[in-house]
Image (cartoon, grey):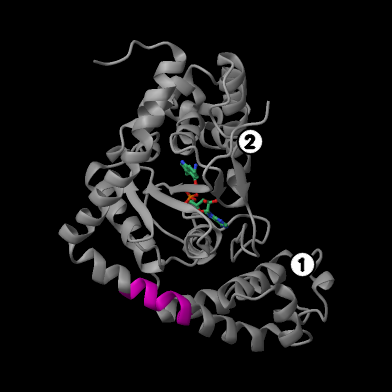
């Protein structure tokens, strides 16, 4: 039986665990803004604070980082009049559906998640139970809204496949056509922004070297310095996009330029092909500063008025709950919980 038609709806989330990078901006939030502006979807975006505590978070830092992430979303262009923006914990239906999905997902599925293996490492006996269950809560974040599309970076692909498996198993076990089989949206030139020091590694807030990443909080001089010192090879930029093959660092800088400029890598090559990095890097630095500085400035302004930020988040949570509550109620009914009087 085909699934019923679902309202085109987008949900995505980022962990408020501190340290926002250019990877988060280009790979995630700038795409979230595009999808908000496309007018084709209802859009919901959250700070996944319940996910953050799967590893230790100092409570004061967590509060700060959650507001900072909210400010980042807003500064980057998420408009509370167009998208629901909220803290995951303010919509208790996420955790409630998460429990049900814990009972649908299989231990074996979770054990195969590469992010679990990376994060728990050899010390998995000592990892939290929440870290293991993390992807089932992520599935709940998505399915509690019957979201049809989820924009994320490349690294989240496996979690989204698991979300589809969980939805399909639920539908199959209970003989219903209830949860949509969500489409991942992993598109654009910046689905994987790489480290500035090693083109084979993702740009990450957890990289021990601060020179490997551009932080959304970096000032203009720092951004320029990091780009100037970014690892490259001795060759000039190639004349064709194919010429980037096997040149991970060169490709990364070209992709970053393309994503910041909102063009394709072929346009960047058309402009800079044959030129030395000595000429390209200052142009990239200029463009990066031009794009990032206004966002950083706006984040500071927003962070200065916590009451206003909290008001926006309360409004976002109320909107989100309006969608989530009836879906949770239906879920409970389907699995056989007594109706609440
Ligand atoms: P994280 O900060 O790792 O929790 O990631 C939050 C969001 O940003 C997710 O959608 C990631 O896929 C995306 N993201 C993080 N780092 C990168 C990167 N280096 N390149 C592209 N997307 C990224
Ligand atoms: N796991 C995602 C990350 O680490 C964060 C996340 C949690 C998420 N729930 C989500 C992303 C729902 C998209 C949709 O980046």
Give the residue pinned by disc 1: 247
Q: Position of residue 107 (x, y in %)?
A: 56, 18
**Magenta part of the protein: which range?**
289-297
Residue 128 seen in the figure: no
The quadrant holding residue 324 is top left
Residue 206 position (above or below residue 238): above
Q: What residue is disc 2 on?
A: 161
Query: Under 8 Å from ligand 1: the CB of mark 1?
Result: no
Q: Which residue: 40% across, 77% down?
A: 293
- Residue 240 point in image, percent of width and height: 83, 77
Q: How many marks?
A: 2
Residue 69 seen in the figure: yes
- Label 1 CA crowd tier, 10 Å (few <14, some 14–19, many 20+): some
Task: Locate residue 167, reporting x and y percent.
Answer: 57, 28
Looking at the rendered image, the quarter that the C terminus falls into is top left
Relative side of 213 to 336, left or right: right
295 falls in the magenta region: yes
Which quarter of the figure is the N terminus placed in? top right
- Which quarter of the picture shows residue 111? top right
- Which of the two residues, 246 or 170, is positioned nearer the viewer here? 170
Report the front residue among 316 and 305.
316
Q: Secondary structure at mark 2?
A: helix
Image coords of residue 92 (percent x, y): 30, 32
Q: Is residue 118 magenta?
A: no
Badge 1 or badge 2: first in the primary sequence:
2
Query: Is 94 located above or below residue 256 in the figure?
Result: above
Q: CA distance from mark 1 to mark 2?
A: 30 Å
């Amino acid at each position: 039986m085909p699934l019923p038609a679902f309202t085109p709806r987008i949900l995505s989330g980022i962990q408020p665990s501190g340290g926002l990078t250019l990877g988060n901006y280009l790979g995630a939030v700038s795409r979230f803004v595009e999808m908000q502006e496309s007018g084709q979807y209802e859009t919901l975006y959250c700070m996944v604070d319940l996910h953050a505590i799967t590893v230790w978070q100092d409570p004061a830092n967590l509060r700060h980082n959650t507001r900072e992430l909210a400010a980042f979303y807003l500064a980057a262009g998420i408009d509370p009049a167009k998208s629901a923006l909220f803290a995951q914990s303010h919509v208790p239906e996420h955790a409630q559906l998460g429990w049900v999905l814990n009972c649908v997902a299989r231990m074996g599925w979770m054990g195969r998640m590469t992010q679990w293996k990376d994060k728990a490492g050899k010390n998995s006996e000592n990892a939290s139970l929440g870290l293991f269950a993390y992807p089932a809560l992520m599935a709940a974040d998505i399915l509690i809204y019957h979201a049809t599309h989820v924009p994320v970076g490349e690294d989240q692909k496996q979690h989204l496949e698991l979300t589809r498996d969980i939805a399909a198993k639920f539908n199959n076990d209970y003989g219903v056509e209830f949860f949509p089989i969500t489409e991942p949206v992993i598109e654009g030139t910046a689905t994987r922004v790489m480290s500035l020091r090693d083109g084979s590694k993702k740009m990450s807030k957890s990289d021990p070297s601060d020179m490997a990443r551009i932080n959304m909080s970096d000032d203009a001089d720092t951004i320029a310095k990091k780009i100037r010192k970014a690892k490259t090879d001795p060759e000039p930029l190639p004349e064709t996009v194919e010429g980037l093959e096997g040149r991970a660092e060169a490709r990364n800088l070209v992709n970053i330029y393309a994503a910041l400029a909102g063009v394709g890598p072929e346009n960047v090559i058309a402009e800079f092909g044959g030129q030395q990095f000595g000429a390209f890097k200052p142009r990239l630095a200029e463009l990066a500063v031009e794009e990032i500085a206004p966002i950083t400035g706006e984040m500071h302004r927003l962070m200065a008025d916590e009451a206003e930020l909290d008001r926006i988040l309360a409004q976002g949570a109320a909107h989100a709950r309006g969608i989530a509550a009836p879906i949770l109620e239906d879920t409970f009914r389907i699995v056989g919980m007594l109706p609440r009087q």
